[in-house]
Image (cartoon, rainbow, N blue to C red):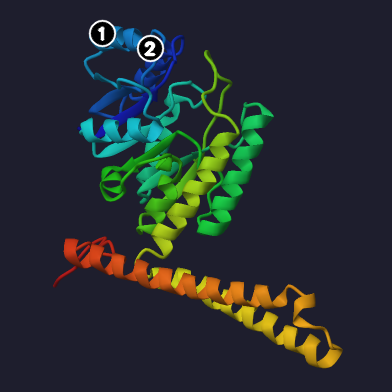
């Protein structure tokens, strides 16, 4: 099996028949392909619609969750049940066009491991577009990965990427960051974006807050997992330096301007910053010991080999 299309579904009645038609059109000429729908605990007729489609199309497999576990869980289940060497992710709302799958796959064939869709012109309300823009700019700046649309559900990538990256929480939107930090070649391709065909959006402003919190976790795990002391120690030394500056200023006020210690908050601030810095350094030591234990006992590598050449 060369291609696996993995589509999370949550309350998408009214979209699935047209989605199947467009998928059939988009997959023409690509060779062997399978379609995996993961029903993430839908409460409408989505599962019945998917079952009916599966009876007509032998390429379709339907996976059903007992309740709503979230998109990351749905993608993980689809990945584990799939057989394709190339994975294609789509949302079921038809805002991304399945007929553009050949363009995405062709971009992958240019030598990339991961192609992310870029909804250059979006047809969404402002309460979705602006939080998404903020999220994308923050993630792009702080990760150093020049993508415009990390949130786009239209993605094509090689199977070994998810074999190397565990998914949990809402990490699905940060797969490009995790992949790039592991040395995979990531790019983007502008795709057409449509208004929602039927149903309502399942996402709100709160998704941006959760996404930024997840990004902080990813940034730490990808940049400092093998050297946590560098992360916590930097904050520790900064806090101690600020505490010493506060103490020096406290004595300058006392000796030069006859300002008593009790008349300023500087003594308490000095002690607080120095103690906080020591705690950061001690936390870094504990994290360093845990990291070393994790890698040494489980023989976990901190690198990824792309290829070997021997003459």
Residue 7 circle label: none
The residue beneath circle 2 is 46
The quadrant in which the C terminus is found is: bottom left
Query: Mark 1 or mark 2, which is nearer the start of the sequence?
Result: 2
Q: Residue at x 74, y 88 (%)?
A: 251
Q: Position of residue 142 (x, y in %)?
A: 55, 58
User: In the figure, 31 relative to 164: above or below?
Assistant: above
- Residue 243 on image: x %, y %: 63, 78
Q: Where is residue 225, by image quadrant? A: bottom left
Q: Is residue 295 left or right of residue 117?
A: left
Q: Residue furthest bottom?
A: 255
Q: Is 230 placed left or right of 304 in the picture?
A: right
Q: Which residue is mark 1?
A: 56
x then y, percent, for residue 247: 68, 83
Q: Residue at x 27, y 32 (%)?
A: 77
- With 262 as the anchor, is 221 left or right in this view? left
Task: Please tell me how crowded label 2 is: few (under 14), some (14-19), or many (20+) other residues with Cα within 10 Å.
Answer: many
- Secondary structure of the residue carrying tag 1 is helix
Residue farthest left in this picture? 311
| Residue 241 picture quarter | bottom right
Can you say whether 177 is above or below 308 in the image? above
Position of residue 253 measured from the top left corner of the image (x, y, whole percent): 80, 86
Where, quadrant-wise, is the N terminus in this rendering? top left
Q: Nearer the viewer, residue 10 or 59?
A: 10
Instruction: Identify which residue, 172 or 17, lies in the foreground.
Output: 172
Point 35% across, 18% down: residue: 24
SS for callout 2: helix
């Amino acid at each position: 099996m060369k291609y696996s299309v993995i589509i999370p579904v949550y309350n998408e009645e009214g979209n699935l028949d047209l989605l199947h038609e467009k998928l059939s059109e988009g997959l023409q000429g690509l060779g062997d392909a399978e379609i995996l729908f993961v029903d993430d605990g839908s409460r409408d007729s989505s599962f019945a619609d998917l079952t009916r489609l599966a009876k007509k199309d032998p390429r379709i497999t339907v996976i059903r969750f007992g309740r709503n576990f979230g998109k990351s869980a749905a993608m993980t289940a689809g990945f584990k049940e799939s057989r394709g060497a190339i994975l294609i992710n789509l949302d079921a709302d038809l805002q991304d066009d399945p007929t553009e799958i050949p363009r995405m796959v062709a971009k992958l064939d240019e030598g990339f491991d991961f192609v992310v869709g870029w909804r250059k012109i979006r047809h969404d309300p402002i309460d979705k577009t602006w939080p998404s823009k903020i999220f994308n700019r923050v993630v792009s700046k702080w990760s150093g990965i020049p993508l415009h649309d990390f949130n786009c559900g239209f993605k094509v990538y090689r199977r070994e990427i998810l074999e190397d990256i565990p998914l949990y929480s809402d990490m699905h939107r940060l797969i490009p960051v995790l992949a790039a930090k592991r040395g995979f070649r990531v790019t983007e391709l502008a795709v057409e974006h449509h208004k929602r065909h039927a149903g309502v959006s399942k996402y709100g402003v709160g998704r941006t807050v959760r996404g930024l919190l997840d990004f902080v976790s990813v940034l730490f795990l990808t940049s400092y997992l093998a050297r946590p002391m560098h992360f916590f120690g930097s904050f520790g030394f900064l806090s101690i330096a600020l505490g010493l500056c506060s103490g020096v200023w406290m004595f300058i006020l006392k000796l030069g301007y006859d300002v008593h210690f009790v008349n300023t908050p500087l003594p308490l601030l000095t002690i607080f910053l120095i103690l906080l810095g020591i705690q950061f350094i001690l936390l870094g030591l504990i994290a360093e010991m845990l990291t070393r234990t994790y890698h040494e006992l489980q023989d976990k590598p901190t690198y990824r080999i792309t290829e070997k050449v021997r003459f």
